Amino acid sequence: MALALDRIAVISDVHGNVTALEAVLEDIRARGITRVLCLGDVVGKGPRGSEAVKLTREACELTVRGNWDTLIGDWEGFVGRGDVPRFPAGQWTREEISDEDAAWLTALPNAYDLVMSGKRIRLFHASQTSEFVRVRWEHTMDEFRGMFTNTDFTGPWAPGLPAHPDDAWPEGTTPDVVGYGDIHGAYLEADEGLLLFNAGAVGNHLDGPSAPYCILEGVTDSLVPQSFSVNFVRVPYDIEAEIAAARDLGMPDAEAYALELRDQVYRGAGKPTS
């Protein structure tokens, strides 16, 4: 008898690209998946941040905070402290979202822990250190191992399982599966009994001309080792319609945005980044 497995969709880096987000959410619904988790950067870079916030809040069970969410959510604070210049695209994005949107973005959690099929899974935006400190797909073993540690940013291991034994997680327990976003390129790496995956960027994909996301498949909330997998999905969508929306709305850097979506060239620099 085949084991009945649960599925959770993991999306990341929507970046105000509503056209891509709607296509991905439709693909998720078509697969019968009802749980969706978001790894942050809901806004920034793309033209419809407020609508992206609305759709993400409706569709996602939980969203962790990304670097753009922090920046735009506390825009006046960052500019006032001199941490960033008042650059046109950032100012435009902050003015496009509401104060309620901004408050929601800044209140998002740093990280989220869960369990599937005995796997201890942690999700965050960029790294265990901060939403602003990234670990690229080319990294050292120290960086790899570091992603699985508990820090002041992640807090202790705390999956919040319903009615789990008090002694299920001894002090110092750490995750053995970590998922993140931020670098706009999906990948999976397994080493030393640890599994690291990047969900890619739904709305600012720099690793191909389609919107990626991941599906976690296993037995939800089970402490017993059972079948578990991380599956990657890529969804085609109308990139030209998204570019037209950016132009029609008068978004700064619309042509650079078009270059990213069409050709996966970061702001004309020739290399992927977030």
Image: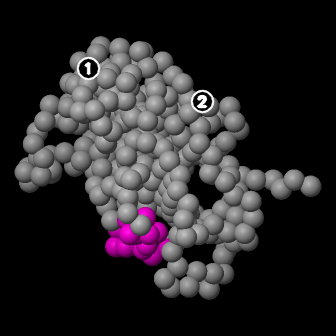
Q: Residue at x 25, y 43 (%)?
A: 72
Q: Pointer 1 and pointer 2: residues touching (CB < 8 Å)?
A: no
Range of the magenta residues?
A: 142-157
Q: Residue at x 37, y 47 (%)?
A: 182
Q: Is the residue marked by circle 2 packed among few (<14), some (14-19), or many (20+) residues within 10 Å?
A: few
Position of 27 with respect to 252 (left or right) is: right
Residue 145: x and y in percent read 44, 69
Q: Main secondary structure of the magenta part?
A: loop
Quarter location, residue 193: bottom right
Residue 170, labelled with which disc? Answer: none
Q: Is residue 155 magenta?
A: yes
Position of 107 with respect to 226 (left or right) is: left
Q: Residue at x 20, y 36 (%)?
A: 90
Q: Is residue 47 magenta?
A: no
The N terminus lies in quadrant: bottom right
The C terminus lies in quadrant: top left
**Which residue is situated farthest in the right direction here?**
1
Residue 203: x and y in percent read 42, 33
Asked if one can make out residue 85 in the rendered structure from this viewpoint, the answer is yes
Asked if one can make out residue 126 in the rendered structure from this viewpoint, the answer is no
The residues bearing labels 1 and 2 have C-alpha atoms spaced at a distance of 27 Å
For label 1, the residue is 255
For label 2, the residue is 26
Q: Is the residue marked by circle 1 packed among few (<14), some (14-19), or many (20+) residues within 10 Å?
A: some
Amino acid at circle 2:
Glu
For residue 162, above or below residue 52:
below
Amino acid at circle 1:
Glu
